[in-house]
Image: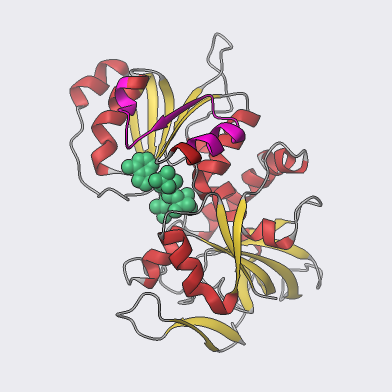
Amino acid sequence: MKAITLTDPDNPRSLALTDAPMPQLKDGEVLVRVAAAGVNRGDLVQAAGKYPPPKGESEIIGLECAGVIEDPGTTGRAKGEEVGCLLAGGGYAEYVAVPEGQLLPKPDNLSLAELAGVVEVACTVWSNLGMLAGVAEPHADGTAKKVLIHGGAGGIGSFAIQLCKALGCEVATTAGSAEKLEYCRELGADITINYREQDFAEELRGWADVILDMVGGPYLEPNVKALATDGQIVVIALQGGAKGEISLGRMMPRRQSLHATTLRARPRTMKADIVRSTVEHVWPLIEAGLIRPNISATFPLAEAARAHDHLDSGASTGKIVLEVR
Ligand SMILES: NC(=O)c1ccc[n+]([C@@H]2O[C@H](COP(=O)([O-])OP(=O)(O)OC[C@H]3O[C@@H](n4cnc5c(N)ncnc54)[C@H](OP(=O)(O)O)[C@@H]3O)[C@@H](O)[C@H]2O)c1
C-alpha cells in the first residue's frame, strides 16, 4: 500500500508518499480502506519527533480516519461498512488496522471526509467535557454549566463550542484574532475574548464551571482566577509549556480541581468506552444537525506536508482533512 513516511527524521516536513507494508490484523481488528484522514496538531508534533506512538501501535502518522471495512477479520462486521476510526496511529495511509471498539458508525448526513475530521475531536471533547467534567448535567438549581473553551477557532475548540451549546451550556471562548472570534460567535459562543489583547482571567473572574485548556503551564494561574467555586480545569495540551505556578490556597476553599488527560495514551479498553459513550451522546447531536463538522481545507494525501504547513501557519479554522481516495 501507499502511506506517508517521514523520510528525514530531522526534517518534520519530509513527508513523502511511499510504499509501506500492509497492516497485519490482530484478533479483534478490522482492516479499513481509508477514504480520508483528519490532520491533528499531534501529527505535527509526531513528525517533529516529539510524540511517538504508544508501544505496539503503527508508526505511521494519523490519529483518525474514515473509510470502508475491507476485511472484518474475526469481528463479524460486514465488508463494505462505512466507518470512522479513532487511531493511535496509521491514518495517513491507504489501509489501516483498527480495533473494533474504535470504530464509529457514519452518520447519514456526513461525508466520509467530514467523518474523518470529526472522530478525534468528538472523542476528545466528549471524554473531557462530558464524561469527566459533566457539562451536560446542569447545576442543582437547574441553571446550565458555564464553560470556558480556549482556542475556540481550532479543531477542538470549534467542536467544543457547538457541543456545549447543543447541551444548553453558556460558552465563553478565547481566540487570537477578530476574524476567529467572529467565527466562534457564528458557532454559538456567548462571550468571546481576544487572548492577545484582553486578560481573560480579569474578564471572567470566577465565572467558569469548567475550563477546557490547551495552553498548559502559563494558563494555570489565570485559569484558576477565571474558575467558579466547585469548578474544574481540564488540560489537554501544553502549547505554552508543561510547567507553571498554581495557587492551591485559592483552589482549596473553592473546592476546585485540575485534570490533565490524553486520549492517545489510553488503553484500548478505555478508548472503546469513550467511543461507545461518544456515539451514544454526541452522534445524535450530529445527526440532528446541531453540530456540524468544520472542514476548512482538504489536501491530497501526497501533500501531507502542505497540510501540516497550513495548520502550523495558524491561518486555518476548524479542521484540515487529507483525501486518500
Ligand atoms: N489530550 C488529548 O487527548 C488531545 C486530543 C486532541 C488534541 N489535543 C491537543 O489540543 C490542542 C488543540 O488541538 P486542535 O486540533 O484544536 O489544534 P488547532 O486546530 O491547531 O488549534 C490550536 C488552538 O490553540 C489556540 N491557542 C494557541 N495559543 C493560545 C493561547 N495562548 N490562548 C488561547 N488559545 C491558544 C489557537 O488559537 P488561535 O488560532 O486563535 O491563536 C488554536 O485555536 C493541540 O495542542 C492538540 O495537540 C489533545
**Front in this rendered view, residue 286 or 21:** 286
Taking 151 as reference, is 65 left or right? right
Up-down: is 296 above or below 77? above
Q: Residue at x 52, y 30 (%)?
A: 134
Q: Position of residue 143 (x, y in %)?
A: 56, 13
Q: Does residue 260 appear anywhere in the picture? A: no
Q: Quadrant of residue 300?
A: bottom right
For the N terminus, give its image quadrant.
bottom right
Q: Residue at x 43, y 42 (%)?
A: 151
Q: Is residue 204 above or below residue 140?
A: below
User: In the picture, residue 95 is in which quadrant?
Assistant: bottom right
In the rendered image, residue 260, in percent from the top left (x then y), is placed at 36, 43
Q: Position of residue 79 (x, y in %)?
A: 80, 73
Quick one: quadrant of the C terminus?
Answer: bottom right
Report if residue 42 is visible in the image.
Answer: yes
Q: Nearer the viewer, residue 120 or 79?
A: 120
Q: Which residues are magenta?
A: 181-202
From the viewer's perspective, tell me whether residue 317 is left or right of residue 219: right
| Image colouring | secondary structure
Residue sitting at x 61%, y 69%: 98
How many badges with numbers are in the image?
A: 0
